[in-house]
Image: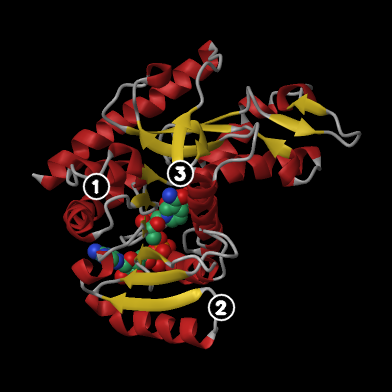
Amino acid sequence: MAKDPVRVLVTGAAGQIGYALVPMIARGVMLGPDQPVILHMLDIEPAAEALNGVKMELIDAAFPLLRGVVATTDVAEACKGVNIAVMVGGFPRKEGMERKDVMSKNVSIYKAQAAALEQHAAPDCKVLVVANPANTNALILKEFAPSIPDKNITCLTRLDHNRALGQISERLNVHVSEVKNVIIWGNHSSTQYPDVNHASVITTNGAEKSVKDAIANDDWLETEFITTVQQRGAAIIKARKLSSALSAASAACDHIRDWVLGTLKGTWVSMGVYSDGSYGIQPGIIYSFPVTCEKGQWSIVQGLKVDEFSRDKMDATAKELMEEKSLAYSCLN
Ligand code: NAD
Ligand code: LMR
């Protein structure tokens, strides 16, 4: 029997991530090849004509899974009945800017859109915040949408996770699918901590080996690997004069797909979620943890050993998130 369509909201849909993301959703990359979708696309008035152009292209692409398109500048209409909300709308960071620089513009958008989601979205709506500062925007959305369960509000650190897998696969000259269980701890910012202490790789003879053993002969994992992943967003902006878009859209699909359909056995992924105090990270911030997903629910992987090097880095990125939180509140007051 054909499945009922799922309503997926993409805010900022006329922007560059939106343009990469909506065809992926319409092709089944996010929710699977047998899941029909209705796309809800929101943007602001100055982008209304461009948004309509995206709608025209979606119609022209004749996607078999696409059962409808709502393209609007009305936030209430956009949020009506949505089951999944991918929040991309906002102002991107330009060359030379830190994520904190886009804070005041973006947190007020997230406060306003929290209310619209709360009133109009489906009660079980799953929310993914992509727009920067992603963790803090997600926190503001959570605080101003108290009736949405905390567990339904997340932010994107899967791009950082995928970047870490990509760097290791390049270094070891193995396919990226043969590397697993890296962790991104903390903020989607240059203080994030890409951790390989529990990561493994399938070697050419088919055996599983720890990444630390596979890259044992130099200090690359403790130095350049970490800074490359932390600074990758800035490197893309420098190269493209625009922030990452196709990789961000692809990571957003990975995040929702794994959340809804489940993670692979023996594998975890990184998601920005509301801290429950795991690993000594204070509640009250949206922090990236290793998670597994089953039946539409994520849970933080427990019991991983944390050494002193990791502890310092995990705490430093938590501290930045606490600072961002107070800055966000001062912008809203
Ligand atoms: P963009 O400027 O191309 O697109 C943003 C879109 O949002 C524009 O069309 C704009 O009109 C729209 N917009 C602005 N205010 C809005 C509002 N109130 N409601 C709805 N739409 C609104 O930017 P982009 O390159 O697509 O990036 C979008 C966001 O994603 C940025 O904040 C960027 O920094 C962030 N980003 C996050 C990650 C991540 O991994 N978390 C990765 C890449 C980019
Ligand atoms: C990224 O990581 O590519 C984005 O968050 C863009 C940025 O500002 O770094």
Q: Which residue carries the number 2 mark?
A: 64
Residue type marked 2: Pro
In the displayed structure image, the side of residue 158 where residue 11 appears, left or right: left
Q: Which residue carries the number 1 mark?
A: 141
Q: Is mark 3 within 8 Å of ligand 1?
A: no
At label 2, counting other C-alpha atoms closer than 10 Å, the crowd grade (few under 14, some 14-19, many 20 or more) is few
- Where on the image, by quarter, is ligand 1? bottom left
Earlier residue among tags 2 and 3: 2
State whether residue 182 is above or below residue 55: above
The CA span between labels 2 and 3 is: 25 Å
Foreground tag (2 vs 1) = 2
In the displayed structure image, the side of residue 152 where residue 178 appears, left or right: right
Q: Which residue carries the number 3 mark?
A: 296
The CA span between labels 2 and 1 is: 33 Å
Q: Are marks 2 and 3 in contact (CB under 8 Å)?
A: no
At label 3, counting other C-alpha atoms closer than 10 Å, the crowd grade (few under 14, some 14-19, many 20 or more) is some
- Of the 4 image quadrants, the one containing the C terminus is top left
Q: Could you tell me residue 321's position as x and y percent? A: 32, 32
Q: Residue furthest left?
A: 333
